[in-house]
Image: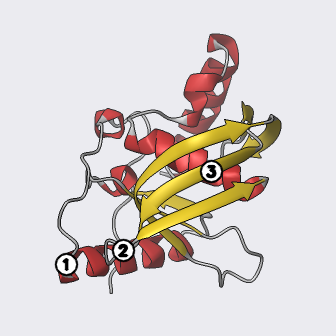
C-alpha cells in the first residue's frame, strides 16, 4: 500500500467531475486500499478520489473513534434525504480550516462495493455529513462553496497565512 498526494484548494483539479467506475478489478481494490491508508495517515474521516487526483466515483470514510469502521462507496447515489443538521466540517484539501455547513440529517444511499455488489445504507448524523461532503467532491464541489463570500474569503485568507507560516 502507499499513501497518495492530496490536492489542496485552490487546485483547479478539485473542480473535476468524476466518472462512474465500470471495472471492478484488482486495480480498483488496490486504489481503495491506498485511499484508506492516505485517509488514516492524514487523520481524516473521509476522502474522495477527486482529492487524490483520480477522477472516478470512489469515496472512503471512517467516522468511528477507534478508526476501525472503514466504509468504501463506489458510484454512490443519494436516493432520499431528510431533516437538517449543522456540523462543523473540515477537509483534507483545506488544512487547518473548519466551518459550519447545513446538510441533510439522514440520507439513504445506493452504491457498490469493491466487487461491484450493491450496497444500500441509511445513515444519519456525522456519517451522513461525511458522505454528503465526499459526494460533493466527486461532483467537483467543496464545502466552502456553501459559505457566504465574506466568510469564505476570511477562511481562505487564514489558510493562506498558515500555509506561508509552515512553508
Ligand atoms: Zn473534503
Depth order, front residue of 96/167: 96
- Decide which of tag 3 and tag 2 comes sooner along the chain: 2
Front residue of 55/93: it is 55
Against 90, residue 153 (above or below) is above
Which x, y percent locates residue 6? 39, 57
Q: Residue at x 28, y 39 (%)?
A: 13
SS for dot 2:
helix
Q: Secondary structure at mark 1?
A: loop
Which of the two discs, 2 and 1, labels the residue nearer the N terminus? 1
- Give the percent coordinates (x, y) of residue 77: 46, 47
Residue 95 seen anywhere in this rendered image of the structure: no
Residue 25 marker: 1
The residue under label 2 is: 32
Colour mapping used in the image: secondary structure
CB atoms of marks 3 and 2 within 8 Å: no
Looking at the image, is 127 positioned above or below residue 97? below
Res. 8 in view: yes
Q: Which of label 2 and label 1 is nearer to you?
A: 1
**163 sits to left or right of 82:** left
Cα distance, mark 3 to mark 2?
A: 22 Å
User: Which mark is nearer the camera, 3 or 2?
Assistant: 3
Residue at 39% x, 44% y: name it.
138
Distance, label 3 to label 1, CA atoms, is 26 Å
Label 2 to label 1, Cα distance in Å?
11 Å
Residue matched to label 3:
108
Does 164 sit left or right of 112 as displayed?
Answer: right
Q: Which disc, if any, is residue 166?
A: none
How crowded pointer 1 is (Cα within 10 Å; few <14, some 14-19, many 20+) is rated as: few
Q: Nearer the viewer, residue 80 or 68?
A: 80
Amino acid at each position: 500500500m502507499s499513501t497518495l498526494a492530496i490536492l489542496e484548494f485552490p487546485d483547479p483539479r478539485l473542480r473535476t467531475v468524476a466518472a462512474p467506475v465500470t471495472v471492478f478489478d484488482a486495480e480498483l481494490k488496490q486504489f481503495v486500499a491506498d485511499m484508506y491508508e492516505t485517509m488514516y495517515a492524514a487523520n481524516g474521516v473521509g476522502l474522495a478520489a477527486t482529492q487524490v487526483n483520480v477522477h472516478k466515483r470512489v469515496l472512503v470514510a471512517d467516522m468511528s473513534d477507534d478508526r476501525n469502521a472503514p466504509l468504501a462507496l463506489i458510484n454512490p447515489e443519494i436516493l432520499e434525504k431528510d431533516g437538517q443538521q449543522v456540523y462543523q466540517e473540515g477537509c483534507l484539501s483545506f488544512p487547518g480550516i473548519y466551518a459550519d455547513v447545513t446538510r441533510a440529517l439522514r440520507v439513504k444511499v445506493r452504491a457498490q462495493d469493491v466487487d461491484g455488489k450493491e450496497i444500500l445504507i441509511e445513515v444519519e448524523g456525522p456519517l451522513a455529513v461525511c458522505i454528503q461532503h465526499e459526494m460533493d467532491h466527486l461532483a467537483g464541489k467543496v464545502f466552502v462553496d456553501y459559505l457566504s463570500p465574506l466568510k469564505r474569503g476570511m477562511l481562505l485568507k487564514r489558510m493562506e497565512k498558515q500555509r506561508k507560516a509552515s512553508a
